[in-house]
Image: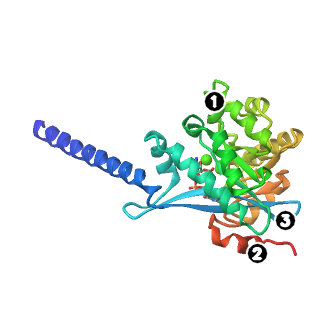
Amino acid sequence: ARQAGHGTFRFFEAAMDEQVQTRRRLELDLRRALAMREFVLLYQPQLNLASHEITGFEVLLRWYSPQHGIVPPSVFIPLAEEFGLIGAIGEWIIRTACREAAGWQRPLSVAINVSAAQFGASNLVPVILSALGESRLDPHRLELEITESVLLKDDGSALDVLRMVRQIGVHVSMDDFGTGYSSLSRLHSFPFDKIKVDQSFVRVGPSDASATAIVRAIAALGRSLGMAIIAEGVETAEQFDRVAAAGCTDVQGYLISPPVPADRIADVVREHSAS
Ligand code: C2E
Ligand code: CA
Ligand code: CA
Ligand code: CA
């Protein structure tokens, strides 16, 4: 038994060792990824239900690592935050997205995800101002998507930043709405322009009556506050019809289009053009 226990420990130790090694490699490669141009921005369209046209795109970051393959943002963004890299990466995203959007044929909106860590790690307001200045993008076309976590343990400074960017004319959306602990009080503390209904209430089967009731309630709430309500993660025609009937104003999801590279944007807009 002692033998086995010892062997188990040795195995465990080796596995731990390997994990630490993998993390170290990831950290080193992540540190180099910006300079090596391994980050790419993909764009996912948002469809307005009144006009049936694409009104904007959400920016979704990808890391194409020669060493690790395609690393999903759910894996590398937390690491970037932990390693103190999120400020620099976030700044690159904002500058690149503003520059690319400024070149689009139509003045569609561009929505950038900003994590809680980015609020602490960078001078968000100066970065946004300078990105807008150098790209000459109309501030009204820029949208920031934040989750509740940004406001959760906030001393008021994140709210100050949000108020300032909104004064510039930048729009602010509440992402993943309905998954936090006190979503309603967040809506009360800041005049969001848009609510993004979390996928967990959207990507459900036709018989999920409670999810449908929740989407309907969120839509009614958003409407009464004068906010747009977009349903995320719409994959099927049935889900599309359901969120439309529930009162959402916009939809996003694989049914419309997966996130696409920048050079596909014009095609996606044309495919969904009413005329
Ligand atoms: P999110 O902001 O909630 O983004 C939506 C996620 O759902 C994206 O995953 C998108 O590709 C995926 N998605 C869109 N439509 C559908 C659908 O119909 N079905 C399914 N199954 N999924 C759909 P992605 O790109 O892997 O991003 C995951 C998360 O990583 C994002 O969640 C966001 O929190 C974060 N993230 C992505 N890009 C950035 C970025 O540039 N900056 C920051 N700070 N976070 C980012
Ligand atoms: Ca988002
Ligand atoms: Ca979301
Ligand atoms: Ca999310």
Q: Is residue 95 left or right of residue 19?
A: right
Q: Give residue 122's mark.
A: none
Classed neighbour count for the residue bearing mark 2: other residues with Cα under 10 Å, few (<14), some (14–19), many (≥20): few
Q: Give the residue displayed 78% in from the left and 42% down from the top.
A: 168
Residue extending furthest toward the front: 134
* Residue at the spot of label 3: 52
**Residue labelled with disc 1:** 152
Describe residue 126's horizontal placement relative to residue 223 as left or right: left
- Inspect the image, locate mark 1, and give the three-letter code of the amino acid beneath it: Leu
Residue 205 in view of the camera: no
Kind of residue indicated by mark 3: His
**Observer-nearest residue: 176 or 43?**
43
Q: CA distance from mark 2 to mark 1?
A: 40 Å
Residue 233: percent from the left, percent from the top?
Answer: 67, 56
CB under 8 Å between discs 3 and 2: no
Residue on which disc 2 sits: 271
